[in-house]
Image: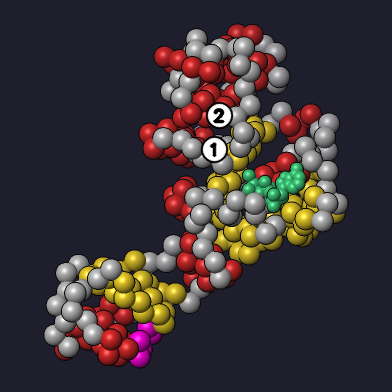
Amino acid sequence: MIISVKNLVKRYGDLLALDHLSLEVNEGEIYGLLGPNGSGKTTAINCILSLLDYHKGEIEVFGKPMSPNAYDIKKNIGVIMQNVAVFEELTSYENIDYFCGLYVNDKALRRQMVEEAIEFVGLNEFRKFYPKKLSGGLLRRLNIACGIAHKPKLIILDEPTVAVDPQSRNKILEGIVELNRQGATIVYTSHYMEEVERICSKITILDKGKVIATGTKDQLKSMITLGETITVETYDITKDQIELIRNLPHMSQVEYKDNLLIIKSDKGKNNLEIILDFIKKQNINFGKIYTELPTLNDVFLEITGKELRD
Ligand SMILES: Nc1ncnc2c1ncn2[C@@H]1O[C@H](COP(=O)(O)OP(=O)(O)O)[C@@H](O)[C@H]1O
Ligand SMILES: [Mg+2]
Protein backbone atom coordinates (compact mmCIF):
# COMPACT_ATOMS: atom_id res chain seq x y z
CA MET A 1 0.00 0.00 0.00
CA ILE A 2 1.29 3.46 -0.88
CA ILE A 3 -0.76 5.54 1.56
CA SER A 4 -2.80 4.37 4.50
CA VAL A 5 -4.79 6.85 6.57
CA LYS A 6 -6.84 5.64 9.51
CA ASN A 7 -9.32 7.70 11.51
CA LEU A 8 -7.61 11.01 10.93
CA VAL A 9 -9.05 13.85 13.00
CA LYS A 10 -7.97 17.45 12.51
CA ARG A 11 -9.47 20.52 14.14
CA TYR A 12 -8.81 24.18 13.57
CA GLY A 13 -10.08 25.63 16.84
CA ASP A 14 -13.73 24.62 17.01
CA LEU A 15 -13.89 23.60 13.38
CA LEU A 16 -13.70 19.88 12.71
CA ALA A 17 -11.84 19.88 9.39
CA LEU A 18 -11.23 16.11 9.17
CA ASP A 19 -13.69 13.81 10.87
CA HIS A 20 -12.21 10.29 11.18
CA LEU A 21 -10.96 10.25 7.62
CA SER A 22 -9.71 6.89 6.38
CA LEU A 23 -8.35 6.02 2.98
CA GLU A 24 -6.03 3.59 1.24
CA VAL A 25 -4.09 4.38 -1.88
CA ASN A 26 -2.65 1.38 -3.70
CA GLU A 27 0.27 1.23 -6.08
CA GLY A 28 -0.53 2.25 -9.64
CA GLU A 29 -3.75 4.09 -8.86
CA ILE A 30 -4.81 7.56 -9.86
CA TYR A 31 -6.63 8.26 -6.64
CA GLY A 32 -9.09 11.12 -6.71
CA LEU A 33 -10.07 13.11 -3.66
CA LEU A 34 -13.22 14.87 -4.76
CA GLY A 35 -15.08 17.39 -2.66
CA PRO A 36 -16.40 20.95 -2.65
CA ASN A 37 -14.28 23.85 -1.45
CA GLY A 38 -13.71 23.58 2.27
CA SER A 39 -14.35 19.82 2.45
CA GLY A 40 -10.85 19.15 3.79
CA LYS A 41 -8.81 18.06 0.76
CA THR A 42 -5.83 20.32 1.37
CA THR A 43 -5.91 19.64 5.10
CA ALA A 44 -5.82 15.89 4.39
CA ILE A 45 -2.86 16.27 2.02
CA ASN A 46 -0.95 18.44 4.50
CA CYS A 47 -1.54 15.91 7.28
CA ILE A 48 -0.44 13.02 5.04
CA LEU A 49 2.77 14.93 4.29
CA SER A 50 3.32 15.73 7.99
CA LEU A 51 3.22 19.42 7.19
CA LEU A 52 0.38 19.82 9.65
CA ASP A 53 -0.20 18.40 13.14
CA TYR A 54 -3.37 16.42 13.72
CA HIS A 55 -5.27 15.34 16.78
CA LYS A 56 -5.81 11.68 16.11
CA GLY A 57 -5.19 9.01 13.53
CA GLU A 58 -2.49 6.93 11.88
CA ILE A 59 -0.74 7.73 8.63
CA GLU A 60 1.62 5.44 6.76
CA VAL A 61 3.33 6.16 3.47
CA PHE A 62 5.14 3.36 1.60
CA GLY A 63 4.27 1.14 4.56
CA LYS A 64 6.10 3.28 7.12
CA PRO A 65 4.80 5.76 9.68
CA MET A 66 5.00 9.26 8.25
CA SER A 67 6.79 11.98 10.24
CA PRO A 68 8.08 15.51 9.54
CA ASN A 69 11.68 14.33 9.14
CA ALA A 70 11.08 11.09 7.24
CA TYR A 71 13.46 12.13 4.47
CA ASP A 72 13.64 8.65 2.92
CA ILE A 73 9.86 8.75 2.41
CA LYS A 74 9.71 12.38 1.29
CA LYS A 75 12.31 11.98 -1.43
CA ASN A 76 9.97 9.53 -3.16
CA ILE A 77 7.04 11.94 -3.09
CA GLY A 78 6.41 14.74 -5.53
CA VAL A 79 4.08 17.42 -4.21
CA ILE A 80 2.27 20.00 -6.30
CA MET A 81 0.57 22.35 -3.87
CA GLN A 82 -2.66 24.19 -4.52
CA ASN A 83 -0.92 27.55 -4.24
CA VAL A 84 1.90 27.82 -6.75
CA ALA A 85 5.19 27.81 -4.84
CA VAL A 86 8.13 28.90 -7.01
CA PHE A 87 10.90 31.45 -6.59
CA GLU A 88 10.24 34.74 -8.35
CA GLU A 89 13.96 35.49 -8.69
CA LEU A 90 14.73 32.23 -10.50
CA THR A 91 13.94 31.37 -14.12
CA SER A 92 11.76 28.38 -15.00
CA TYR A 93 14.85 26.25 -15.57
CA GLU A 94 16.49 27.38 -12.33
CA ASN A 95 13.33 26.74 -10.34
CA ILE A 96 13.02 23.17 -11.57
CA ASP A 97 16.74 22.64 -11.02
CA TYR A 98 16.43 23.95 -7.47
CA PHE A 99 13.57 21.63 -6.49
CA CYS A 100 15.14 18.64 -8.23
CA GLY A 101 18.39 19.46 -6.41
CA LEU A 102 16.71 18.92 -3.06
CA TYR A 103 16.76 15.20 -3.86
CA VAL A 104 19.28 14.68 -6.65
CA ASN A 105 22.91 15.73 -6.10
CA ASP A 106 24.50 14.37 -9.26
CA LYS A 107 24.69 17.34 -11.63
CA ALA A 108 24.65 15.46 -14.92
CA LEU A 109 21.72 13.33 -13.85
CA ARG A 110 19.92 16.41 -12.59
CA ARG A 111 20.43 18.28 -15.85
CA GLN A 112 18.87 15.36 -17.69
CA MET A 113 15.94 15.21 -15.26
CA VAL A 114 15.29 18.94 -15.50
CA GLU A 115 15.34 18.74 -19.31
CA GLU A 116 12.87 15.87 -19.22
CA ALA A 117 10.57 17.77 -16.88
CA ILE A 118 10.68 20.87 -19.11
CA GLU A 119 9.89 18.74 -22.13
CA PHE A 120 7.14 16.92 -20.26
CA VAL A 121 5.16 20.03 -19.27
CA GLY A 122 5.92 21.81 -22.57
CA LEU A 123 7.89 24.74 -21.17
CA ASN A 124 10.80 24.59 -23.58
CA GLU A 125 10.28 28.05 -25.03
CA PHE A 126 9.85 29.49 -21.56
CA ARG A 127 12.86 27.99 -19.80
CA LYS A 128 14.53 31.39 -19.36
CA PHE A 129 11.35 33.18 -18.31
CA TYR A 130 10.83 34.37 -14.76
CA PRO A 131 7.54 33.27 -13.12
CA LYS A 132 6.12 36.82 -13.34
CA LYS A 133 6.18 36.56 -17.14
CA LEU A 134 4.26 33.28 -17.30
CA SER A 135 0.47 33.01 -17.79
CA GLY A 136 -1.56 31.24 -15.10
CA GLY A 137 -1.54 27.98 -17.05
CA LEU A 138 2.19 28.05 -17.72
CA LEU A 139 2.87 28.86 -14.08
CA ARG A 140 0.88 25.80 -13.07
CA ARG A 141 2.91 23.72 -15.48
CA LEU A 142 6.13 25.09 -13.98
CA ASN A 143 4.81 24.23 -10.52
CA ILE A 144 4.18 20.68 -11.71
CA ALA A 145 7.62 20.38 -13.32
CA CYS A 146 9.20 21.41 -10.00
CA GLY A 147 7.30 18.65 -8.21
CA ILE A 148 7.97 15.79 -10.63
CA ALA A 149 11.50 16.37 -11.99
CA HIS A 150 13.12 14.00 -9.47
CA LYS A 151 10.84 11.16 -10.70
CA PRO A 152 9.01 10.40 -7.46
CA LYS A 153 7.07 7.14 -7.02
CA LEU A 154 4.14 9.00 -5.50
CA ILE A 155 2.85 12.29 -6.90
CA ILE A 156 0.32 14.37 -5.01
CA LEU A 157 -1.41 17.18 -6.88
CA ASP A 158 -3.75 19.51 -5.01
CA GLU A 159 -6.22 21.17 -7.39
CA PRO A 160 -3.66 21.71 -10.15
CA THR A 161 -6.19 22.94 -12.71
CA VAL A 162 -7.92 25.73 -10.83
CA ALA A 163 -7.96 29.00 -12.80
CA VAL A 164 -6.21 27.41 -15.77
CA ASP A 165 -7.10 27.89 -19.44
CA PRO A 166 -8.60 24.85 -21.25
CA GLN A 167 -5.42 24.15 -23.20
CA SER A 168 -3.20 24.00 -20.13
CA ARG A 169 -5.90 22.06 -18.29
CA ASN A 170 -5.89 19.37 -20.95
CA LYS A 171 -2.13 19.29 -21.01
CA ILE A 172 -2.06 18.88 -17.22
CA LEU A 173 -4.65 16.08 -17.21
CA GLU A 174 -2.92 14.22 -20.04
CA GLY A 175 0.38 14.69 -18.23
CA ILE A 176 -1.00 13.13 -15.05
CA VAL A 177 -2.24 10.09 -16.95
CA GLU A 178 1.17 9.78 -18.64
CA LEU A 179 3.05 9.99 -15.31
CA ASN A 180 0.82 7.22 -14.05
CA ARG A 181 1.47 5.15 -17.18
CA GLN A 182 5.19 5.55 -16.52
CA GLY A 183 4.69 4.00 -13.09
CA ALA A 184 3.88 6.76 -10.60
CA THR A 185 1.02 6.44 -8.16
CA ILE A 186 -1.05 9.62 -8.18
CA VAL A 187 -3.21 11.38 -5.63
CA TYR A 188 -5.29 14.05 -7.26
CA THR A 189 -7.61 16.43 -5.46
CA SER A 190 -10.25 18.47 -7.22
CA HIS A 191 -13.70 19.95 -6.90
CA TYR A 192 -14.24 19.35 -10.63
CA MET A 193 -16.12 16.09 -10.92
CA GLU A 194 -15.62 15.87 -14.69
CA GLU A 195 -11.85 15.81 -14.26
CA VAL A 196 -11.94 13.23 -11.52
CA GLU A 197 -14.27 11.08 -13.61
CA ARG A 198 -12.00 11.40 -16.60
CA ILE A 199 -8.69 10.36 -15.06
CA CYS A 200 -9.16 8.65 -11.68
CA SER A 201 -9.21 4.89 -11.21
CA LYS A 202 -10.50 5.22 -7.65
CA ILE A 203 -12.37 8.08 -6.05
CA THR A 204 -13.14 9.18 -2.53
CA ILE A 205 -15.87 11.77 -2.18
CA LEU A 206 -15.39 14.09 0.77
CA ASP A 207 -17.86 16.40 2.43
CA LYS A 208 -17.21 18.39 5.61
CA GLY A 209 -14.11 16.36 6.39
CA LYS A 210 -15.92 13.04 6.12
CA VAL A 211 -15.66 10.30 3.54
CA ILE A 212 -19.12 9.94 2.03
CA ALA A 213 -18.23 7.25 -0.51
CA THR A 214 -15.24 5.47 -2.06
CA GLY A 215 -14.98 3.37 -5.20
CA THR A 216 -14.46 3.38 -8.93
CA LYS A 217 -16.73 5.80 -10.76
CA ASP A 218 -18.99 2.93 -11.77
CA GLN A 219 -19.18 1.64 -8.20
CA LEU A 220 -20.05 5.13 -6.96
CA LYS A 221 -22.79 5.50 -9.55
CA SER A 222 -24.25 2.14 -8.68
CA MET A 223 -24.60 3.24 -5.03
CA ILE A 224 -27.44 5.60 -5.92
CA THR A 225 -31.00 4.96 -7.08
CA LEU A 226 -30.88 7.39 -10.01
CA GLY A 227 -30.67 5.41 -13.23
CA GLU A 228 -30.73 8.00 -15.97
CA THR A 229 -31.88 11.53 -16.68
CA ILE A 230 -34.09 11.77 -19.76
CA THR A 231 -34.50 15.19 -21.36
CA VAL A 232 -37.25 15.98 -23.87
CA GLU A 233 -37.50 19.26 -25.72
CA THR A 234 -41.17 20.08 -26.16
CA TYR A 235 -43.41 23.14 -26.45
CA ASP A 236 -46.87 21.67 -26.08
CA ILE A 237 -47.07 19.49 -23.02
CA THR A 238 -49.87 20.08 -20.51
CA LYS A 239 -49.80 20.00 -16.72
CA ASP A 240 -51.97 16.91 -16.77
CA GLN A 241 -49.58 15.11 -19.08
CA ILE A 242 -46.66 16.00 -16.81
CA GLU A 243 -48.61 14.57 -13.89
CA LEU A 244 -49.24 11.38 -15.86
CA ILE A 245 -45.50 11.03 -16.53
CA ARG A 246 -44.85 11.38 -12.81
CA ASN A 247 -47.02 8.34 -12.27
CA LEU A 248 -45.30 6.16 -14.86
CA PRO A 249 -43.19 3.33 -13.45
CA HIS A 250 -39.54 4.19 -12.48
CA MET A 251 -39.98 7.95 -12.91
CA SER A 252 -38.86 9.53 -9.65
CA GLN A 253 -38.74 13.22 -10.50
CA VAL A 254 -40.20 15.26 -13.35
CA GLU A 255 -39.58 18.96 -14.02
CA TYR A 256 -40.64 21.19 -16.89
CA LYS A 257 -38.70 24.40 -17.44
CA ASP A 258 -37.61 26.46 -20.47
CA ASN A 259 -39.32 24.01 -22.85
CA LEU A 260 -37.31 21.15 -21.45
CA LEU A 261 -38.93 18.23 -19.72
CA ILE A 262 -36.35 16.69 -17.39
CA ILE A 263 -37.16 13.27 -16.05
CA LYS A 264 -35.06 11.49 -13.47
CA SER A 265 -35.69 7.78 -13.51
CA ASP A 266 -34.67 4.96 -11.22
CA LYS A 267 -32.47 2.18 -12.51
CA GLY A 268 -34.30 0.14 -15.13
CA LYS A 269 -33.79 -1.23 -18.60
CA ASN A 270 -36.39 0.54 -20.72
CA ASN A 271 -37.04 3.90 -19.14
CA LEU A 272 -36.50 5.78 -22.38
CA GLU A 273 -38.91 3.41 -24.13
CA ILE A 274 -41.59 4.07 -21.49
CA ILE A 275 -41.25 7.82 -22.09
CA LEU A 276 -41.22 7.50 -25.89
CA ASP A 277 -44.34 5.31 -25.81
CA PHE A 278 -46.14 7.84 -23.66
CA ILE A 279 -45.17 10.75 -25.91
CA LYS A 280 -46.39 8.93 -29.02
CA LYS A 281 -49.68 7.84 -27.46
CA GLN A 282 -50.37 11.38 -26.26
CA ASN A 283 -49.35 12.92 -29.58
CA ILE A 284 -46.93 15.30 -27.94
CA ASN A 285 -44.68 17.17 -30.39
CA PHE A 286 -41.06 17.10 -29.40
CA GLY A 287 -37.64 18.18 -30.66
CA LYS A 288 -34.54 16.67 -29.16
CA ILE A 289 -34.75 13.75 -26.77
CA TYR A 290 -31.76 12.30 -25.02
CA THR A 291 -30.74 10.33 -21.97
CA GLU A 292 -27.74 10.77 -19.69
CA LEU A 293 -26.21 8.39 -17.16
CA PRO A 294 -25.63 9.68 -13.63
CA THR A 295 -22.63 11.90 -12.98
CA LEU A 296 -20.59 12.14 -9.80
CA ASN A 297 -22.60 15.28 -9.10
CA ASP A 298 -25.72 13.08 -8.96
CA VAL A 299 -23.92 10.76 -6.53
CA PHE A 300 -22.97 13.74 -4.35
CA LEU A 301 -26.49 15.16 -4.58
CA GLU A 302 -28.20 11.93 -3.65
CA ILE A 303 -25.95 11.23 -0.66
CA THR A 304 -25.59 14.76 0.77
CA GLY A 305 -28.72 16.47 -0.54
CA LYS A 306 -26.74 19.30 -2.12
CA GLU A 307 -24.93 20.08 -5.37
CA LEU A 308 -21.21 19.49 -5.76
CA ARG A 309 -20.94 22.24 -8.35
CA ASP A 310 -20.15 25.67 -6.99
N1 LIG B 1 -5.31 27.36 8.75
C1 LIG B 1 -6.60 27.26 8.94
N2 LIG B 1 -7.21 27.79 10.01
C2 LIG B 1 -8.54 27.67 10.23
N3 LIG B 1 -9.37 27.01 9.40
C3 LIG B 1 -8.84 26.45 8.31
C4 LIG B 1 -7.45 26.54 8.01
N4 LIG B 1 -7.22 25.87 6.86
C5 LIG B 1 -8.41 25.40 6.45
N5 LIG B 1 -9.39 25.75 7.30
C6 LIG B 1 -10.81 25.36 7.22
O1 LIG B 1 -10.87 23.95 7.21
C7 LIG B 1 -11.83 23.47 6.29
C8 LIG B 1 -11.14 22.59 5.25
O2 LIG B 1 -10.30 23.40 4.45
P1 LIG B 1 -9.41 22.82 3.29
O3 LIG B 1 -8.68 21.63 3.79
O4 LIG B 1 -8.59 23.94 2.76
O5 LIG B 1 -10.51 22.35 2.24
P2 LIG B 1 -10.38 22.13 0.65
O6 LIG B 1 -8.94 21.95 0.34
O7 LIG B 1 -11.21 20.89 0.39
O8 LIG B 1 -10.97 23.33 0.01
C9 LIG B 1 -12.48 24.71 5.70
O9 LIG B 1 -13.66 24.95 6.43
C10 LIG B 1 -11.45 25.78 5.93
O10 LIG B 1 -12.06 27.05 6.04
MG1 LIG C 1 -7.78 22.94 -1.03
- Mark 2 = which residue? 144
Asked whether 52 falls inside the magenta stretch, the response is no
Residue furthest right as drawn:
55
Question: Mark 1: few, some, or many residues within 10 Å (few <14, many ≥20)?
Answer: many
* 83 left or right, relative to 226: right
Residue 11 image position (x, y, % from top left): 80, 52
Which one is earlier in the sequence, the residue at label 2 or at label 1? Answer: 2
- Mark 1 = which residue? 160
Residue 138 image position (x, y, % from top left): 47, 25
Q: Is residue 57 visible?
A: no
- Real-space Cα distance between discs 2 and 1? 8 Å
* 124 left or right, relative to 45: left
User: How many numbered marks does the figure carry?
Assistant: 2
Asked whether 250 falls inside the magenta stretch, the response is yes
Q: Residue at x 53, y 14 (%)?
A: 130
CB of mark 1 near ligand 2 (< 8 Å): no
Which of 168 and 242 lies nearest the eye of the viewer? 242
Q: Which residues are magenta?
A: 246-251
Q: Residue at x 53, y 71 (%)?
A: 302
Q: Residue at x 64, y 51 (%)?
A: 38
Position of 186 relative to 279 (above/below) = above
Question: Mark 2: few, some, or many residues within 10 Å (few <14, many ≥20)?
Answer: many
User: In what element is the residue under mark 2?
Assistant: helix
- Magenta stretch mostly in which secondary structure? loop
User: In what element is the residue under mark 1?
Assistant: loop
Q: Tell whether label 1 touches label 2 (CB within 8 Å).
A: yes
